[in-house]
Image (cartoon, rainbow, N blue to C red):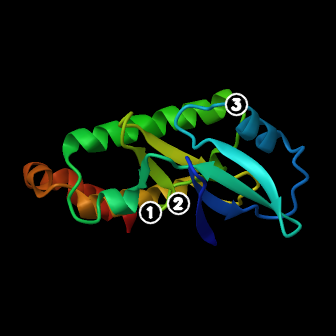
């Protein structure tokens, strides 16, 4: 998936090409663009070179891979992240959106530095598998989990790793 970034005078955007053909009248597009859905990145659909693209507002946010590239995630941060993901999933259900269109890769989960909340990217018409994507995210997080937690709970970590095989 091609990702690009653009900065206007007061805003930063992550730009993703729309998968497949979009008219803009799709239910998911109308819900995402027309509403502020908590824990989902705000989004606008635009046409560029005759193709639909999505501009996601990421001003004041850092992608997960950057947040945890030089440090480990502690237990409190893990709980907050999982709570925000849970709320995002509940909100997709509330707006009748398909959870398989959430992107769980670390480059698409953004931490808002002021509100201290995580925001997920919802890409309409994306053909994803939420269960598999979340499993990969879990593996990513386990590798970055604070060693103080893993030392206290080795059976939980070992059990999870065995389940993933």
Mark 1–mark 3 Cα distance, whole angstroms, equals 29 Å
Quick one: label 2 or label 3, which is nearer the N terminus?
Answer: 3
Mark 2–mark 1 Cα distance, whole angstroms, equals 6 Å
- Rendered residue at 62%/41% (across/down): 42
Q: Residue furthest top?
A: 94
Which image quadrant: the N terminus? bottom right
Label pair 2/1, CB-CB below 8 angstroms: yes
Residue picked out by circle 1: 136
Label pair 1/3, CB-CB below 8 angstroms: no
Q: Mark 2: few, some, or many residues within 10 Å (few <14, many ≥20)?
A: few
Tell me where residue 8 appears, x and y as whole percent: 61, 54
- Rendered residue at 72%/46% (across/down): 44
Quick one: label 1 or label 3, which is nearer the N terminus?
Answer: 3
Residue picked out by circle 3: 35
Tell me where residue 130 appears, x and y as whole percent: 57, 53
Q: Mark 3: few, some, or many residues within 10 Å (few <14, many ≥20)?
A: few
Vertical arrangement, residue 33 with respect to residue 72, above or below = above
Look at the numbered disc 2 and give the secondary structure of its residue: helix
Tell me where residue 40 appears, x and y as whole percent: 57, 40
Tell me where residue 16 appears, x and y as whole percent: 67, 62
Q: Residue 132 got which mark?
A: 2
Vertical arrangement, residue 5 with respect to residue 57, above or below = below
Q: Mark 1: few, some, or many residues within 10 Å (few <14, many ≥20)?
A: some
Vertical arrangement, residue 162 with respect to residue 40, above or below = below
**Left or right: where does residue 70 sit relative to residue 8?**
left
Q: Tell me, yes or no, if residue 96 can be seen here.
A: yes
Depth check, front residue: 86 or 11: 11
- Rendered residue at 49%/43% (across/down): 119
Depth check, front residue: 149 or 1: 1
Look at the numbered disc 1 and give the secondary structure of its residue: helix
Mark 2–mark 3 Cα distance, whole angstroms, equals 28 Å
Vertical arrangement, residue 103 with respect to residue 82, above or below = below
């Amino acid at each position: 998936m091609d990702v690009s970034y653009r900065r206007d005078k007061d805003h930063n955007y992550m730009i993703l090409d729309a998968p497949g053909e979009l008219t803009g009248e799709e239910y998911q597009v109308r819900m995402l663009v027309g509403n502020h859905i908590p824990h989902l990145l705000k989004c606008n659909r635009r046409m560029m070179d005759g193709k639909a693209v999505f501009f996601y507002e990421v001003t004041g946010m850092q992608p997960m891979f950057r947040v945890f590239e030089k440090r480990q995630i502690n237990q409190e941060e893990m709980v907050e992240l999982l709570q925000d993901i849970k709320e995002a999933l509940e909100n997709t259900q509330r707006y009748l959106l398909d959870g398989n269109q959430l992107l769980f890769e670390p480059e698409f989960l953004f931490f808002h530095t002021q509100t201290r909340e995580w925001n997920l990217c919802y890409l309409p018409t994306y053909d994803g598998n939420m269960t598999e994507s979340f499993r990969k995210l879990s593996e990513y997080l386990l590798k970055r989990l604070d060693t103080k937690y893993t030392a206290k709970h080795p059976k939980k970590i070992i059990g999870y790793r065995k389940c993933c095989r």
